Amino acid sequence: MKNFFIILCACLASVSVAQQTDYVDFKKVEALIVFNQFQVDSTKYNSYDAKFDILRSTDSIYLDAINMKFIHVAIDGSEINFSNDGKKLKIYHSFEKGKTYNLSFLFFASPKKAMYFVGWENEGRNQIWTQGQGKYTSNWLPSLDDTNDKIEFDLKFVAPKTYQVISNGVLKSKSDNDGHVLWEYDMKHPMSSYLVAVVVGKYDKKTETSKSGIPLEYYYYPEDSLKVEPTYRYSKQMFDFLEEEIGVAYPWQNYKQVPVHDFLYAGMENTSLTIFSDAFVVDSIGFNDKNYVNVNAHELAHQWFGDLVTAKSGAHHWLQEGFATYYALLAEKDVFGENYFYFKLLESSIDLGKQDISGNGTSLLNPKSSSLTFYQRGAWVLHALRTKVGDRVFRQAVINYLEKYKFKNAETSDFIKEVERIYGRSLSSFVNLWIKQKDFPVDNAFDILKQQSTYINEFLMVDCQAKSSKCSEYLKYYVSDEAKAKIISQVPELVTPETFNNGLKVRQAISKYVRQIPVNLKEDYESLLDDKSYITIENALYNLWSSFPEDRSAYLFKTRDIVGFNDKNVRLLWIVLNLSTPFYKADNKQALFQELIGYTGEKYNADLRIKAFQYLKMIKSCNEDCMSNLENAKSHHNWRLVKFAKQLSEELEQKRN
């Protein structure tokens, strides 16, 4: 009986915790965060003030707070009882229904996740940045992991004066004080806690203004001034397009975008402050291969879908990711044209079909669905729905949905009801097919594409797996570059000197699929080294070096100053090829080897380190310094690098044994 009582109490406690939003509504948080430059993995004692309304009388409330310490906890100025179990700060008081209270305290945070201190101990790029998606903000700021409780966060920060501090909202004031600067940011509207963010680093800024008057702030590293235009290309155009296409004004005071080092993902749509990986900071050549446009548009669309209206639970996650993916595609369509738009939809439908074949397909309402399902199937739902109900109904339903649930939370049925109300008919069969059904309706998707795009019909028609006589003719004449690239991937032996006269995508396909280069293509193939594509140059350099040993010195000389992307893809290949060309004496081989080893060090970005490790493994030259850096990589904050390092360590250990 005693055990039963303990279990019952635990269950009742968990229920009360889960339903705090029924008892209390947090309205506003004002906090001061002090960054200590001498203890870079933590903050000093910080001040916190919260205003909240009591909806139902209760004797306690809580904030999520991971691994924090608290002092001077008070309600309306009077210190009260509290407890701290390392996960939650619980406040005990006789809270009366209908009353508003003010909570204040000082807290110390030493976050193990969500706030990352990057580069401070290895002469790297000194930064602090946050990533709170899911329920992680409570690792550095007392808050609420429940996305259904939206709060207005007005934050202040103290940091060394040589650093910029960028956070949600508008910078109200900035004041110097004895080597440090106080930054004060203001938000006007509430948001879920996971969207609170801050970046500390050394940046310059370019500002534009949208057609509607919203300030658009583009941050960049001072040494990257020549990369600002290609990195942020089309930003204003896409902002103006989405405001008009969505039909609801951008809901926040400004919009800021900041690149950071070794970010965990491509980007994150923090309210009014998108943080993105500096791997997308590119020059005009890199733009042709790996640009920021799609991520840019996706995170911007989230400012409405996810930030303004937030899904009630993981079962409705597609309301954020599907909408952001679809509206990003619409913005890209405005930039790159209809063919681009339909080709991306075709690619996603093929990927979704393959996912089903592999047995990994799920309903869109399954909270454990893959990113492919949430993002791409979610986007397809919206495109198919728009096709079914028409532009007018679809656009008005989206407007009504955003207006009705702004600064609130919604679920799938809420959106569908708005569409049905204007459409005048039930959409239950549509919902069953496109949303609830486990398998993606790939045949229906293909039918839609075929009806809407002659370009897609042509692409699907051109298929050279059977190597028909038409294939060589296709390469000569009217089909699209995408169709020609498809042919080259299937029958690379059909490439002729004339094929090189096509555009960047076709030439890139040649570099990828024509690996053993016939002598009659040698001169044309060498022209690929001059293309405005780091992917093409990387592929072509290796294939030429392999196919024509007698000309290796010429190829190395021609490409010796090309670096490539943020991960130095061309430079790394060049070093390895140089080391593997004994008769090429133009460089100090030992210095080049040390340079390659150096790129495995912790001051470099994760993608570069991974590539350097891979090349050293390939040439069987992972020495003691390499192994030491590999061990260090296992404790990195970037999960991709950690996974890679552990796997490579196991492989190298097995070879030794």
Image (cartoon, rainbow, N blue to C red):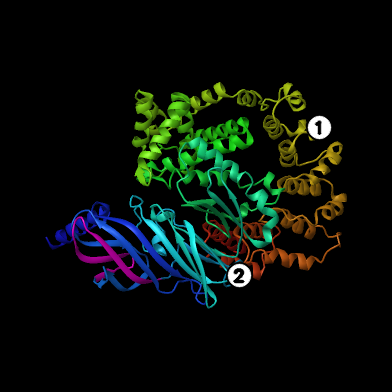
- CA distance for labels 2 and 1: 48 Å
Q: Is residue 181 left or right of residue 2?
A: right
Q: Secondary structure at mark 2?
A: helix
* Amino acid type shown at disc 1: Thr
The quadrant in which residue 33 appears is bottom left
Q: Nearer the viewer, mark 2 or mark 1?
A: 1
Q: Nearest the camera: 298 or 655?
A: 298
What are the residue bounds of the magenta stretch? 81-108
Residue 458: x and y, percent?
64, 23
The image shows residue 109 at horizontal and vertical percentages of 41, 70
Name the side, left or right, on which 34 lies relative to 602. Answer: left
Q: Quadrant of the N terminus?
A: bottom left
Mark 2 and mark 1 lie on one chain; the one further toward the N terminus is 1
Task: Say which residue label 1 marks.
Answer: 496
Q: Is residue 189 visible?
A: yes
- Residue 89 in picture, x, y percent from top left: 30, 66
